[in-house]
Image (cartoon, rainbow, N blue to C red):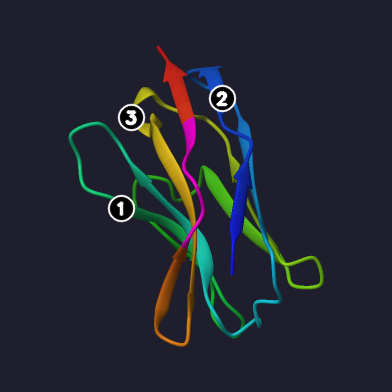
Amino acid sequence: VQLQASGGGLVQAGGSLRLSCRASETIFSWNPMGWLRQAPGKSRELVARIRSGRYPDYAESVRGRFTIFRDNAKNTVTLEMNSLEPDDTALYYCWSKIDGHDYWGQGTLVTVSS
């Protein structure tokens, strides 16, 4: 499975961005999909994930500002990011776990200027 991410960019604090990720093959709804990020000098951290039968999980730092949603028919997962802060600056990675294996998209850079 290949994950193709898009949508990063440069935005001022308080602005919004949308990240999209499309899988090359069908990912069943019970397999989680989501987004992680890695800021310079920091470890990769979960931003949000979603799978059928559960409420989405969000990092505490983004809850209320970011929304994740998924279109299983199109094999896509999207992250709506609002009220962006400079601390949201990072490489964002699309992710899925299938049969115990982690799959990663290429990182897409989000830069939030103050």
Residue type at mark 1 is: Glu
Judged from the image, the secondary structure of the residue bearing numbered disc 2 is: strand
Q: Earlier in the sequence, mark 3 or mark 2?
A: 2
* Quarter holding residue 76: bottom right
Residue type at mark 3 is: Asp
- Cα distance, mark 1 to mark 2? 19 Å
Q: Magenta includes 27?
A: no
**Residue at the limit of the structure toward the right, as seen here:** 73
Residue pictured at 25% horizontal, 31% vertical: 40
Mark 3 in CB contact with mark 2 (< 8 angstroms)? no
Position of 95 relative to 55 (above/below): above
Magenta residues?
A: 104-109
Residue 27: image location, x then y, percent: 65, 77
Residue position marked by numbered label 2 in the rendering: 9
| 22 or 68, nearer to the observer | 22
Judged from the image, the secondary structure of the residue bearing numbered disc 1 is: strand
Q: Earlier in the sequence, mark 3 or mark 1?
A: 1
Q: Which mark is residue 75?
A: none
Residue pictured at 59% horizontal, 58% vertical: 3
Residue 4: image location, x then y, percent: 62, 51
Residue position marked by numbered label 1 in the rendering: 45
Residue 93: image location, x then y, percent: 46, 49
Judged from the image, the secondary structure of the residue bearing numbered disc 3 is: helix
Residue position marked by numbered label 3 in the rendering: 87
How crowded pointer 3 is (Cα within 10 Å; few <14, some 14-19, many 20+) is rated as few
How crowded pointer 1 is (Cα within 10 Å; few <14, some 14-19, many 20+) is rated as some
Residue type at mark 2 is: Gly
Residue pictured at 52% horizontal, 30% vertical: 83
* Image quadrant containing the N terminus: bottom right
